[in-house]
Image (cartoon, helix red, strand yellow):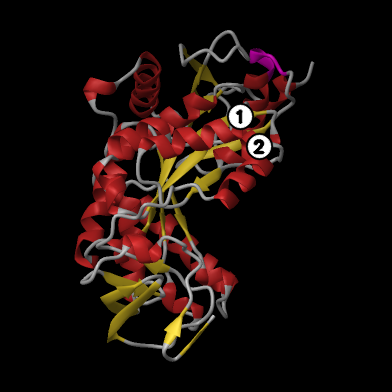
Amino acid sequence: DGTSSGVHSPYERLSRDLKPGHRVLLADGTIELRVQSINGEDVECKVLHGGVLFSNKGMNLPDTEVSATTLTEKDKTDLAFIAESDIDLVAISFVRRPEDIREARQLLGKNRIPVLAKLERPEALNQLNGILEEADGVMVARGDLGVEIEFERVPFVQKQILRRAAVRGKWAIVATEMLRSMVDHSRPTRAEVTDVANAVLDGADCVMLSEETAVGKHPEVAVQAMMRILKTADAAESLPLERFESDIISFAAGAAGAAVSAAERLGAKAIVVLAGSNVTALLLSKWRSRVPILALSGGEATLRRLNVLRGVIPISIQSQAGMEEQIRLADQRLITEGWARPGDTIVIAGAIPLGEGKETNSIRFHRVRPQESFFP
């Protein structure tokens, strides 16, 4: 609610958190105010850069230490609902410290839904390593982040976040204004094409469209343009991507790295991940394999989550299939999809025994069998 002379904010602590001289940024920073004085709950500001303010636009306080907790009461209600639902993953907004992720996990209870930290506040950058330890992945949410910090720092902060996520084996998503001009136009700008391609080169697992598909005039064209850029950048990639740092490699990460190295040296057509070895798929992805990774699973939710991982192709199988049956199904799929021919080498990785949640401990070399051997 508001008029040309004032607007209402639902944030009850606003007048207590702000101080004279602090900046108040509205609508992704397109409107900039500076606090002049505070009288009770009224905050008087000077308009530095004006504009039209529409309903439900965001507010950023880059100079202010916000006293509100990261998780609002609505967030807690939503997480309780998510805990009982078939949700693939949940992203927590405005994460500032590792404790925010731990609190979200407590609210999710026994439901092991992957939790992503949206990095939008400067405080999160100061505690990035701790947040990466707690979260399953991170999102470089450049809309709010580019308002909370100096916009010229965003490219370098993005690279830093992606690098640290890569060396810790965590998902990383880049979002906001990737193809912003396609909200109105049917072709991206050259700068946008470069931005998306650089996200690939920086090591992002995923990129995300928002306004382009939510309110844009050409949603399908925007998705098609994004896919073209991603495929070209992935194929033309010449610079080595970040891999695990030697001082944080675990047994499972080392096994995954050995599988990738062997597959690349042998000219293998694929790395097949046995069902129940979801962590193996993540670790293989983080070693930035040049060889396609086929991840087998009998769970629909798991298959959807595997789509987030770079270079991983989820393959649906019967949930009770044993190891030899999984390998047979993988051979069949590789041939029918044209990914391999009989006699080609593949590498099989996973956690043995199957279904016991063990860490990656098995690497097997296998030659694809001809189709006639699929049936007795």
- Judge by depth and name the residue closer to the eye, 71 or 285: 71
Q: Which residue is mark 1?
A: 109
Q: Position of residue 246 (x, y in %)?
A: 23, 23
Magenta stretch: residue 84 in it?
no
Residue 188 visible, this orientation: yes
Residue 344 visible within the image: no
Image quadrant containing the C terminus: top right
The reply, left or right, for residue 21 in relation to residue 110 is left
- Our reading of the magenta stretch's main secondary structure is helix
Distance from the alpha carbon under mark 1 to that under mark 2: 7 Å
Q: Residue at x 38, y 51 (%)?
A: 234
Local secondary structure at mark 2: helix
Above-or-below relation of 161 to 47: above
Pick out the residue farthest to the top. 353
How many other residues sit within 10 Å of disc 1, few (<14), some (14-19) or many (≥20)? few
Could you say which is closer to the camera, residue 106 or residue 188?
A: 106
- Give the image location of residue 247, x and y in percent: 22, 21
| Residue 201, image x, y percentages | 30, 51
Say which quarter of the image contains residue 215. Answer: bottom right
* Residue span colored magenta: 321-325
The three-letter code of the residue at mark 2 reads Ala
In the image, taking residue 305 as reference, residue 81 lies left or right, namely: right
| Residue drawn at the location 44% of the way across and 91% of the way down | 4
Q: Amino acid at mark 1?
A: Gly
Q: Tell me where residue 260 sits by quadrant.
A: top left
The image shows residue 17 at horizontal and vertical percentages of: 33, 60
State if disc 2 and disc 1 touch (CB < 8 Å): yes
- Near mark 2 (Cα within 10 A), the count class, few <14, some 14-19 or many ≥20, is some
Is disc 1 placed on a helix, strand or loop?
loop
Q: Which residue is mark 2?
A: 83
